[in-house]
Image (cartoon, grey):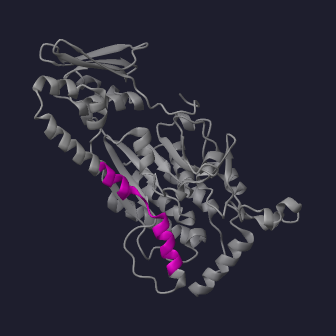
Amino acid sequence: MLGGSFPYQDVSMFYGNVFDISYNFLGRIDDVTQTVEWGTLDAHCYSLLYLKNDVLQAMFSVGRTAEETAAAEELIRRRVNLHASKARLRDEAFLLDTLPAQTVLILQGGGALGVFECGAVRGLEERGVHPDVVAAVSIGAFNGAIVASHPGDAAKPLAEFWRELSITLPGVGDPCIHQALLSWYVLYAGVSNFLQPRWWNALSGCETLVPWWTSLYDATPITRLITRYVDFELLGQSPVRLLLSAVDVATGERRIFDSYVDRLTPQHLLASGSLPPGLPWTTVNGKQYWGGGIVSNSPLDLVIERCGSIGKRVFAVDLFSGTKALPANLLEVMLRRDEIVYTDRVRNDLRFEEYANDFGELFQDILRRVDPLEARRIRQNPRYIRLMGNRAPIHVSRIELREGASTSFVRDYDFFAATVQQLQEHGYQAALERSQR
């Protein structure tokens, strides 16, 4: 599937009745190497699992619950290796929907605030928390690519990456003077390993003059930098699945870049982080993209769409969180506006899941009033299984950048070395507080 430009998403499911027995068959049995039986047909509760190299390929079932059939569908879709659980598959007390959950890490966009995510990854790794899936946008896409490229051991390369993004300026005691100096520096010189101002090239020809600009900065430097920390040739083979979000400039539609589907390159990362008007759109496969943060800055919905919602433990690094005091001046107004615009939509995604669970409870109540034989047939129907089986709750732990950690009006581009170190430590401590072994 790698490089096919479409997700490994559809698992075939057949449904039928033989006299009073309703059955399902899902997946394909090409080149299977082992089968495992569970239960008996006489008891109208039976399954036959088809595996290839300990990965579930297909299942024939009678009388299994919608939750377990949906779990089997997810195992096939995600190509989960069942070696550690294979001995339990024959145990009639063991259910597929009780298999260990996927751990998901969500990384937001926020410019220089992304170093908070660097610290959070270090804290999670120290607690023994390692993601199976990373969903990221903007600067989070660069952090996420390093996490996926160094599974289980990303803290050190992330810290080094952010050290190279840091800038050093003369020490100034007054915070206001420091912020003004930093603003002028970034405006004039950019950030050496991240972005450079367009006006450096303004004398190259008429096409480079201001009326034809579509952005203020050029992000070529970070494209070169990220290749030293991510092996893009091997990224698709990483056990950590990377999902990135971007927006098609021409159509306004969101695009998901998936390391299990696409051959990701530095351009895919840059497309996810090309936030206008600071950065220009990025062309990938002939289409132009802006950063996915325009649509959603905390893409839990990417995970649900590509990986399902069954058995997910989510750690969402939240760079724009919490209730804040009312702004007292124009600068604080602008800061709070950006926080509201880019605040995550995780709560909306969870609210949708709650509505789906309420619908499921109502449907189950109606089904209890139906003839038992007909109810049993309905429960084996693929549409019922896909609607009702995908109801396991999503557990979200939020690692929040608290108020006071970075309230400067230059925080999005405050790559000052001392600030980078401070935010990294805040992220580390916040992750330690929120994570459990």
Q: Residue at x 60, y 61 (%)?
A: 163
* The image quarter in which residue 368 lies: top left
* The image quarter in which residue 216 lies: bottom right
Q: Residue at x 45, y 73 (%)?
A: 405
* Horizontal arrangement in the rendering, residue 420 relative to residue 285 (left or right): left
The chief SS type of the magenta part is helix
> Is residue 173 in sight in this rendering?
no
* Horizontal arrangement in the rendering, residue 140 relative to residue 397 (left or right): right
Q: Residue at x 74, y 73 (%)?
A: 188
* Horizontal arrangement in the rendering, residue 241 relative to residue 314 (left or right): right
**Looking at the picture, does residue 149 appear above or below residue 164?**
above
> Is residue 241 in sight in this rendering?
yes
**Looking at the picture, does residue 329 appear above or below residue 90?**
below
Q: Which residues are magenta?
A: 333-353
* The image quarter in which residue 417 lies: bottom right
Question: 95 or 364: which is nearer to us?
Answer: 364
**Looking at the picture, does residue 319 appear above or below residue 358?**
below
Q: Is residue 342 magenta?
A: yes
Q: Position of residue 108 (x, y in %)?
A: 49, 58
Q: Position of residue 204 (x, y in %)?
A: 88, 61
* Horizontal arrangement in the rendering, residue 230 relative to residue 26 (left or right): right
Question: 65 or 197: which is nearer to us?
Answer: 65
Q: Position of residue 332 (x, y in %)?
A: 50, 81
Q: Position of residue 63 (x, y in %)?
A: 19, 23
Question: 274 or 415: which is nearer to us?
Answer: 274
